[in-house]
Image (cartoon, grey):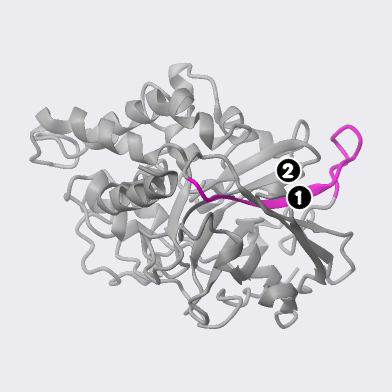
Amino acid sequence: MTAGRLVHRRTLVLAALVAAIGAIVLTAFFVHQAGPSSARAADHLDAPGLTPPPGGDGIGTDLTDIYAFQSPADAGKTVLIMDVNGLTTADLANPPGPDRPFGTKVPFVRGNPNVSYNFRVDSNGDAVPDVNIQIRFGKPTADGTQQMRVKILGPGGEDIAFAGSSTGFGEPAVVNSGPLGIEAFAGRRDDPFFFDLVGFLNILDIGGKSFVGCGAANSQPENDTFKGQNVSSIVLELPSTLLEGGGDSNIGVWATTNVGDSQIDRMARPAINTVFIPNNPFPPDRAVDGKPSKKTTFNHGQPSTDVANWTGEVVDTLRTTFSLNDNGGALGGTDNPADDPGKINALAAVLLPDILTVDVSNPAGFLNGRKPADDVIDAELGLITEGFVTTDCVGSNDVAFPTTFPYLTAPHPTHS
């Protein structure tokens, strides 16, 4: 079987299994904190190594979500999105305030090296990047505008580079045009992630704050914890041929933030680090159980070593999440757990390595890549609870997504 076919096979397996991830991800919010400001949704604020010292420049290098999907405007192009600077509404206006620029340099890191934002693309199924897309920013002006430089390095060493600018705070979206019909955007946008965090935090409080039994898929949109939240987004639309290997349309994508040669954060599927990597909210991996944090270690790692390094941690957590539907369990489940080990091992083999797989010739969304409007929570809840819970009753974003580039909604006023 060729490497390209392996990628395609993984995508097909994902269609059967990876629906568990977002729900698994969000079950990580069975924490003792009850307020949104302490939440770690998707990958928002997912690791201690993101603040200086020793690593990042705060949330400017903290990846919150990434997306990859076929362009709705041109079937021959692919859209890639990464978001950073999450949880920055006015009530969270710690310095430098809710309107935060992209990182440029990090004064706490020796040598004061540049910050870069990177899309990594695997085109042959070996979990190693074949295409690297790097975005860097210059010093922000008073309104947050920054010079932006995009560089695409292909598998043969060829590169494409062009410059543009980010969108200033409160300004209309600036669309930068590059060679080969590439378009690029960077700036503040509405946070596209939507779900009922409080319902997750209190999922065992059935009949109370839990969303179990809440009704239809979008019957309680007011419970969207991320309503009114903003992020800083980088959006690229580019010919799919720049990402494919040998004409195979199946690729894997993840994002990293880097300071000089040091990797600060990485992300592909929603919140793998948040949920599966200690310490997390599940025994025996909680801080109260004495399990040390390995989240920064995960963030500094590579997908090619995920299976060897992290399968045990994923299996440990899945044992707990699968048990929620056991006969006589906390959620009142009726499942016979006899077949759980086989399901758990199969799912762990799909979740790792942590790469978002997408067939860029296919316009479908999640589980094929991820589009902003995809309700990943409802798509995932059934598997993580073995069919016991199928919706959080928040079925869409608080503001509709545009159908044109940059495909994300304008940011909410921050009053900073």
- Amino acid beneath label 2: Asn
Q: Nearer the viewer, residue 42 or 354?
A: 354
- To which quarter of the image does residue 177 belong? bottom right
Which residue is pictured at 43% across the width and 70% down the height?
A: 373
Query: Toward the viewer: 164 or 401?
Result: 164
Quadrant including the N terminus: top left
Q: Is residue 10 above or below residue 318?
A: below
Task: Give the residue pinned by disc 2.
Answer: 258
- 354 with respect to 375 (left or right): right
Q: To which residue does mark 1 refer? A: 116
Residue 43 lies, in percent from the top left, at 53, 47
Question: What amino acid is labelled 1 in the image?
Answer: Ser
Query: Tag 1's secondary structure?
Result: strand
CB under 8 Å between discs 2 and 1: yes
Q: Is residue 65 above or below residue 71?
A: above
Quarter of the image where one finds residue 166: bottom right
Q: Residues within 10 Å of mark 2 (few under 14, many from 20)?
A: many
Highlighted magenta segment, given as a residue range: 105-124
